[in-house]
Amino acid sequence: MESIKGRLFYMDELYIENFKKLAMTRHLGDNMTSVLIAIALFGLTVYFLTSRKRRNTPPAIRGRLPILGNILQFRGAQPFYILTKWAEKYGPIYTLRIGAINAVVLTSGDLAKEALVTKYGSFPSKHMTTALTIATQDKKMLPTLDYGPHYNALKRHMVTHLLGPIPQKENRVLRHELIIRMINGMFEDMPSDGRVVNMSAIVNNLLFELALRQVLGFAPKEMYVAELGFLNREQIYKILVQDLLELGLQFDWRNYWPMLSWVPNKKKENIWNETARRRDLVCEELWKMYKKQFALTGPTGCYADNINEDDETFKIKENLIPMIIWELVLESVDTVSVASEWIIYELARNPQVQERLYQEIKSVAGDRMVNEDDMRNLPYLDAIIKETLRVYNPVPVLIPRIPAEDITLGGYDIPKGWDVIVNQWGIGRDKTRWPDADVWDPERCLRDSSIDLGIKDFKITPFGGGKRMCPGIQQGVSMISLEVCGIVQHFEFSFPPNEGNTDAEISMVTFTTRKATPMLAYIKARVKNILPA
Ligand code: HEM
């Protein structure tokens, strides 16, 4: 009995022990649950606090659709017009979304300076579309290269041998020779009552010839390219400049929905590849022609004389030389010709400004032809160029930069990997900064001597800014000045009566702000012949 009792007791004891253990476990369990809940709450609080911090992103454009984002809101107008309209509504920094890509748009000089100068190191690379990747043979062109030793070496080479002050001084004779040729050409078959000319073509031809000669030492009127046959100058221009500029803007939806990048888009890719292939064939042939010429005559003082085929700078990604020839030709022609076209357009529209510029040139150069030394004594010309670059910025938006780390801009948080777009067009047309922002008026740049095209002052940034600022600024401004002064000194021009397009429409098909229709002008000679040097 005792044993049973004892057993019972034992069982009681056991039961109590177990009960205690159970209670302990429950207690512990309760504690554990509380701990877990506490951890979860803590985690959530931290998440909300940090995500709230992370979500301190700039205001977002309203109307964003699931999957599509804001893309449909770009329909029917130039993207830079829309970006600028949004800046008027949402302020100088805002975000938008295209497909899966988030972008921050900057529309103020201060913000551009913060991104391009102060926080330059945070943006080692740029966002490339498929078309741009094909056009640049996967970032072989300097403006698209990631920041690094190869970028530095290539830029140094271009500046030392072509774009810096010393080679630019040496190319002065060439520029002068070509301006004389342009003016003589305009005088040809000139009736006393004037005639209508295509100013866009005149300026383009001049710049294309300059580009080829300063890079290669020659500018072929025609050439034979295996697979393409004989090409005349116009066809060479089309293959090297026009077709590639049109490629720059081509849209590929896979760039904005990367998870669908496996879906083929063969039809478009074939066209883009063919455009780039034709460019490569022409550039390879030009390089062969240069080498033949060099074997006969030795150096002629052109940029190619400084290319050493064994130099690592030109071998880092297969053979870079044909691409460098191409990029220097393209860059020397397009933006400069866009700016010159718009100046001629505004001078035709504003005869009183044209007359005042003519009087300024005459007061400095008298009866001889204006030259590059005169330019520093022509403040009205300087104001005309700056005002044109403000109103018709040839590069309306910079290629998007991608921050390699989380950064802040304008006090907002910008997550790593987002696109950062500098809206240069909007900076020039900012209504809060410029009274009558859309009106072309050189007086405003005459009054404000601090405007320096983005070197120190960021009120306008036609050449970008910071370390990736355009190294061709000196050549660009020299050529614009020489062309415009040469034409104004010898001819009076206006819109042709009953002919030509007098509105300021911008082409929808190129990356730069080229006038949609060629600039036709009715010209009348001011003097009988070209003026002596
Ligand atoms: C009015 C004339 C010109 C304008 C408005 C202009 C504009 C620009 C702009 C805005 C950039 C910066 C692009 C970016 O950061 O995303 C740039 C870069 C560049 N430009 Fe120009 N440009 C002009 C003339 C020239 C000329 C004549 C050349 C030389 C042949 C040239 C060569 C370059 C190069 C090599 C870069 C890349 C610089 C780098 O990434 O470090 N440009 N240009």
Image: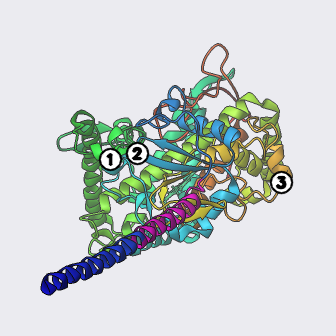
Quarter-of-image position of residue 256: top left
Q: Are marks 3 and 1 in contact (CB under 8 Å)?
A: no
Image location of residue 332, percent across then percent down = 49, 52
What type is the residue that disc 1 sits on? Pro
Which residue, given by chain and number where applicable, does mark 1 sit on?
258
Quarter-of-image position of residue 449: bottom right
- The overriding secondary structure of the stretch rendered in magenta is helix
Label 3 within 8 A of ligand 1 by Cβ: no
Q: CA distance from mark 2 to mark 1?
A: 7 Å
Q: Are marks 2 and 1 in contact (CB under 8 Å)?
A: yes
Q: Is residue 446 left or right of residue 41?
A: right
| Residue shown at 73% from the left, 28% from the top | 349
Which residue, given by chain and number where applicable, does mark 2 sit on?
100
Under tag 2, what secondary structure? loop
Foreground residue among 101 and 200:
101
Q: Is residue 318 magenta?
A: no
What type is the residue that disc 3 sits on? Asp
Foreground residue among 105 and 125:
105
Residue extending farthest top: 498
| Residue shown at 63% from the left, 38% from the top | 86
Q: Is residue 61 left or right of residue 15?
A: right
Which residue, given by chain and number where applicable, does mark 3 sit on?
448
Q: CA distance from mark 2 to mark 3?
A: 43 Å
Q: How is the image coloured?
A: rainbow
Image location of residue 481, percent across then percent down = 66, 50
Image location of residue 221, percent across then percent down = 36, 42
* Segment tinted magenta in the rendering: 31-57
Q: Is residue 437 left or right of residue 119?
A: right
Please say whether residue 486 is visible from this viewpoint: no
Q: CA distance from mark 3 to mark 1?
A: 46 Å
Foreground residue among 229 and 393:
393
